[in-house]
Amino acid sequence: MSTTANKEERSLNFLEEIIEADLASGKYKTIMTRFPPEPNGYLHMGHATSICLNFGLTKKYGGSTNLRFDDTNPVTEDTEYVESIKNDIKWLGFEWANELYASDYFEQLYNMAVTLIKKGLAYVDDSSSEAIAEQKGTPTQAGRRNEYAERSIEENLQLFADMRAGKYKDGEKVLRAKVDMASPNMLMRDPLLYRIKHAHHHRTGDTWCIYPMYDFAHGQSDSIEKITHSICTLEFVPHRELYDWLIKKLEIYPSHQYEFARRNLTYTVMSKRKLLQLVNEKHVAGWDDPRMPTISGMRRRGYTPESIREFCDRIGIAKRDNVVDISLLEFFVREDLNKRAQRRMVVFDPVKVVITNYADPDGEELLTSENNPEDPNGGTREVPFSNEIYIEREDFMENPPKKYFRLAPGQMVRLKSAYIIKCEEVIKDENGTVTELRCTYIPESKSGSDTSGIQVKGTLHWVSVKHAITAEIREYDRLFKVEDPSSEEGDFKEYINPDSLKVIRAAYAEPALKNAHYDERFQFVRKGYFVLDKDSSTSGMVFNKTVGLKDGWKAGK
Ligand code: ATP
Ligand code: MG
């Protein structure tokens, strides 16, 4: 993988190779994929990979992609999650052909189960889950069938109908496929197809008290929708044998399952179950906390859909599990934001500069500054200048080392888009803290029409004191202290970084930021990329730091 390679140069990934072969041989005229989230949490960056892959393939080769909610587990699912998932996919820039729900297939799935029973390929088992587990054997030792496997087809049909009718309590009976108790693949040892669960379902309400297991819903739903390439993650490799067995025995549309490696990122966790714990235990401010690896969190943080798509596309897919450095994702975010972010000046920790020779002490003028030097159509804005400005406290040093190009006594710097100033006097309070810097400015040194002939090496950002607006700034660090919290000893939450959020209550911003909009992206000059946060109200603006300016990621690292 090389981030400098052109898109055109990227070789086909293994799924693209399969699809191109399938289309060339005429196996399929058009392809059909699906994205099948379980609505039990908000989508994260791993899902983004799967979305970009599934939707990306049909975008590239024609065909369509369904959004199918895999809602066969009534207990953990919720409509809030359904809505957030739809919102996130749209935001990423994809459109599904059909919005579907596995629960819409419950009747068809029930009938398929009846078909299997009629073929003598499924039976109702009254054993406890412990007994079933025990009879399954071990990977090196065959399992054994119990007496329930001998039930007649008629008896099984009746019992299964009674299960549906609600005659039994949770766990009293299950429906199992009759496959092979000696199979080296444990999943083939008479796997469970249905379980009893008297629970309210977010879509089907109380219509059902039996629910299909993942293995008896997923492949069958693929078949119903005539999915040609059913793409899932590596942990489903052992399930493929059962997937194929069920399709063959039911004589339904032959969808095919293909597996790729889960996408993991450093310094975070990528599992809805773990992310839910962070939310419930209030380690973060919600699913869309800007530190979360969720799509909604990244959106709030200021990541663009373009940069996420580019990341997924350029990094490709793997057949082996791997952890990708989060700074690589940040690299793509920064690359994209550099092109689209409007430049603004914001001083985080101010020290006042008084320009003593500014013509009229009450005077002020409007200077012109480019919105984005990377964008020829970015336009300009007016920045008010006056005899009192703020600069960053860290941009002044009373006793600087050699080659210090910022402000120091007797030294000159340029104020961005404004003038060259020279520090003449340092005012301090009784504790020795600098409270004011008295400077003179060079009137002929105005940016754009500089005739002063003076060369300075440092350029500082600044804001005019009387024009500045204040804003809260939230800066984020890694959510975890270690690269892979899930693989560390003990609970993953022990590795949470306690300093992942830094708040600056009142930074001073140039007035143009007053009109900032949520979908605008900004570069605060010399500070990084920022976006307006939803916590902003008329009483106060809040900005999230998306990512810093520096490229932390080095090729080959
Ligand atoms: P989680 O453990 O976070 O709940 P999941 O795989 O159970 O993840 P689903 O809602 O079942 O989540 O997943 C929907 C789709 O997204 C599946 O096809 C799944 O394989 C894919 N997916 C989920 N996590 C990742 C990941 N980290 N990398 C790539 N694809 C993923
Ligand atoms: Mg899942």
Image (cartoon, helix red, strand yellow):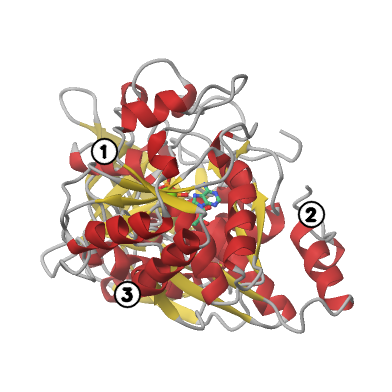
Q: Residue 517 — which label? A: 3
Which residue lies most toward the top here?
489
Q: Are marks 1 and 2 in contact (CB under 8 Å)?
A: no
Q: Can you tell which of label 3 and label 2 is closer to the viewer? A: 2
Counting from the top left corner in percent of width and height, residue 127 is at 31, 34
Mark 3 crowdedness (10 Å alpha carbons): few <14, some 14-19, many ≥20:
few
Answer above or below: position of 426 versus 86.
above
- Amino acid carrying mark 1 in the image: Gln
Tally of numbered discs: 3
Q: Which residue is mark 1?
A: 277
Horizontal and vertical percent position of residue 114 = 42, 65
Q: Is mark 1 within 8 Å of ligand 1?
A: no
Left or right of residue 141, residue 398 in this image: left
Q: Amino acid at mark 3?
A: His
Q: Secondary structure at mark 3?
A: loop
As drawn, is 70 to the left or to the right of 231?
left
The x, y position of residue 13, in whole percent, is 78, 57
Mark 2, other Cα within 10 Å: few <14 / some 14–19 / many ≥20: few
Is mark 1 in CB contact (under 8 Å) with mark 3? Answer: no
Which residue is located at x 57 percent, y 57 percent? 49
Instruction: Choose the circle earlier in sequence order: 1 or 2.
Output: 2
Q: Between 230 and 392, which is closer to the camera in this rendering?
A: 230
Residue 10 sits above or below residue 107 on the image: above
**Disc 1 from disc 2: Cα separation:** 38 Å
